Image: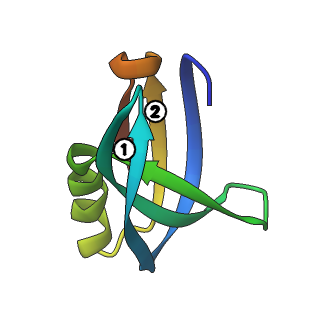
Amino acid sequence: MGYLDLKEFQFDPERLEQVEAEFNGKKSIRFRYTVKEDGIETEQHFEASKRTSEEINTYLMEGVTKLKILRSGSGTDTYYLGRSD
């Protein structure tokens, strides 16, 4: 995903794990989802911050597993916004 991208993913709500990641020399907790990109059968991983993960989980708890994810920014200024149709 680049500076401003919109992709659609099918999330598997049963396949979520908490992982430790390092970014700019700092360790942080990330949440790794197993997803399939719309039109592609190969499984991928989508890692999210706690804030983004909480937003995604709100949809998953409502039974919505197909989400459009908008990525805005880059580096430490990256923000992900999830939405359903």
* Visible residue check, residue 75: yes
* Residue appearing at x 57%, y 48% in the figure: 8
* Residue appearing at x 29%, y 46% in the figure: 28
Mark 2 sits on what residue? 70
* Residue appearing at x 21%, y 55% in the figure: 54
Instruction: Give the Cα distance between marks 2 and 1.
Output: 6 Å
In the picture provided, is 41 more to the left or to the right than 30?
right
Q: Quadrant of the N terminus?
A: top right
Which structural element holds mark 2? strand
Q: Pinpoint residue 59: horizontal percent, then vertical percent.
A: 28, 62
Instruction: Name which residue type carries label 1.
Output: Gly
Label at residue 82: 1
Quadrant location of residue 58?
bottom left
Position above or below: 71 against 38: above
* Residue appearing at x 36%, y 20% in the figure: 76
Q: Pinpoint residue 48: horizontal percent, then vertical percent.
A: 38, 48
In the picture provided, is 22 more to the left or to the right than 58?
right
In the picture provided, is 23 more to the left or to the right than 9?
left
Position above or below: 25 against 65: above
Q: Pinpoint residue 35: horizontal percent, then vertical percent.
A: 58, 64
Which structural element holds mark 1? strand
